């Protein structure tokens, strides 16, 4: 199966780790509702005893499109580096 035929939300149930989702508010290819839905799906598979804030982080980059511009890249990288540093 190729990625275009994959049901991403069905695949989420197989992942138990921490998640950081970064999504642009002006993405015309993948609507922000998909990022919100994914975050909720990950929360529904959360291991017992793990707090929401430690399991799933959802960030929106105001004005960011599907392919971030350089200024949006800077914001995304900062968020991702902070996430990675907290969960080394």
Image (spheres, grey):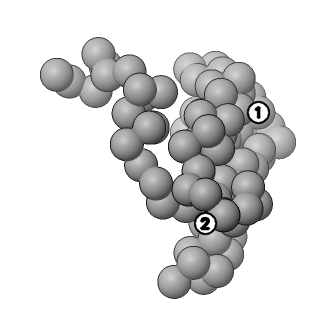
Q: Is residue 57 above or below residue 40?
A: below
Q: 61 or 86, which is in the foreground?
A: 86
Dot placed on the residue nearer the N-terminal end, 2 or 1: 1
Residue 77 is situated, as x and y percent measured from the top left of the image, at: 61, 66
User: Where is the N terminus found, in terms of image quarters?
Assistant: top left
Residue sitting farthest toward the top: 5
The residue beneath circle 1 is 25
Residue sitting farthest toward the right: 62
Residue 49 is situated, as x and y percent measured from the top left of the image, at: 66, 64
Q: Which mark is residue 80?
A: 2
Q: 80 or 64, which is in the foreground?
A: 80
Secondary structure under the numbered disc 2 in the rendered image:
helix
Left or right: 78 in relation to 41? right
Q: Cα distance, mark 2 to mark 1?
A: 17 Å
Left or right: 3 in relation to 38? left
Secondary structure under the numbered disc 1 in the rendered image:
loop
- Picture quarter containing residue 38? top right
Residue 53 is situated, as x and y percent measured from the top left of the image, at: 76, 60
Q: Is residue 22 above or below residue 81?
A: above
């Amino acid at each position: 199966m190729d990625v275009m035929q994959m049901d991403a939300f069905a695949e989420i149930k197989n992942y138990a780790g921490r998640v950081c989702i970064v999504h642009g508010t002006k993405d015309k290819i993948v609507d922000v509702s998909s990022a919100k839905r994914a975050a909720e799906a990950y929360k529904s598979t959360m291991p017992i005893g793990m707090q929401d804030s430690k399991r799933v982080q959802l960030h929106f980059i105001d004005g960011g499109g599907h392919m971030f511009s350089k200024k949006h890249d800077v914001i995304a990288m900062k968020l991702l580096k902070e996430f990675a540093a907290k969960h080394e």
